[in-house]
Image: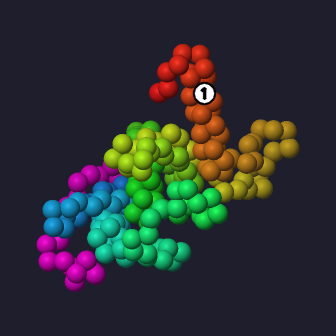
Amino acid sequence: MLLYELFNDVNFECINIDGAQNNCRFKMTVTINEKKFDGTGPSKKTAKNAAAKAALASLCNISYSPMVVPQKNVPLPIDDKSSSMELPQIHADTIGRLVLEKFMEVIKGQEAYSRRKVLAGIVMTENMNFCEAKVISVSTGTKCVSGEHMSVNGAVLNDSHAEIVSRRCLLKYLYAQLDLQCNQGIVV
């Protein structure tokens, strides 16, 4: 593992096991020079690899995503409307972890419903502070509805993609915030 080649003080620890025996989620932490990095996965090996990837992305700017080209000391394009808004991979991993943790919290005790689903979520931060991030929506959906489950009388929702459902949840949240602001002057 590359992490062991780059650093002498590498310690992995399994800190959490969630779910039923056939649907477990493991959470591993790697400590390097007194800095901790988390990773989750369906096995200890996968969780360990995720933690190692998070450490490499943060400490060495090494990304395992084929679409992300590591760049050093490049500020985020906050005000430039023409450039695309891309976050470092470490932020994307943090957002994904927050959404997955909230999903696991919601379905705790009902793990049978978590199989074969597409998961999407929306996370709100203030000034890119991920320590205080708030999960606004978590949703599941299907990629497609197979032929035997199709319905012409409206019994089946055909477009239940997780991303679409999460967007609807975000809109509902935003409208609720507007309503609170207009009626009470208080925003949650």
Say which element carries label 1: helix
Q: Is residue 49 visible?
A: no
In the image, taking residue 87 as reference, residue 168 lies left or right, namely right
> Which is more toward the observer, 133 or 112?
133
Q: Dot 1 corresponds to which residue?
A: 178
Give the magenta range. Answer: 1-24
Is 141 placed left or right of 153 in the picture? left
Q: Position of residue 135 (x, y in %)?
A: 46, 42
The answer to if 7 sits in the magenta stretch is: yes
**Figure coloring:** rainbow
**Residue at position x 47%, y 27% from top?**
188
Q: Is residue 155 left or right of residue 64?
A: right
As drawn, 175 above or below 107: above
Q: Is residue 177 magenta?
A: no
Image location of residue 50, percent across then percent down: 35, 66
**What amino acid is found at the position of numbered circle 1 in the picture?**
Leu
- Seen at 55% across and 56% down, the residue is 79
**Depth check, front residue: 11 or 17:** 11
Name the residue: 57% across, 47% down: 140
Q: Is residue 40 above or below residue 104?
A: below
Q: Quick one: which residue is furthest to the bottom in this view?
A: 5
Above/below status of 13 relative to 168: below
- Left or right, 27 with reference to 125: left
Residue 115, how many percent across, how many down? 51, 53
Q: Nearer the viewer, residue 28 or 124?
A: 124
The x, y position of residue 41, in whole percent, is 37, 61
Q: Quadrant of the N terminus?
A: bottom left
Residue 50 visible in the picture: yes
- Residue drawn 36% across and 42% down? 132
Specify few, some or many for label 1: CA neighbours under 10 Å numbering under 14, 14-19, or 20 or more. Answer: some
Q: In the figure, residue 175 lies in which quadrant?
A: top right
Residue sitting farthest toward the top: 184
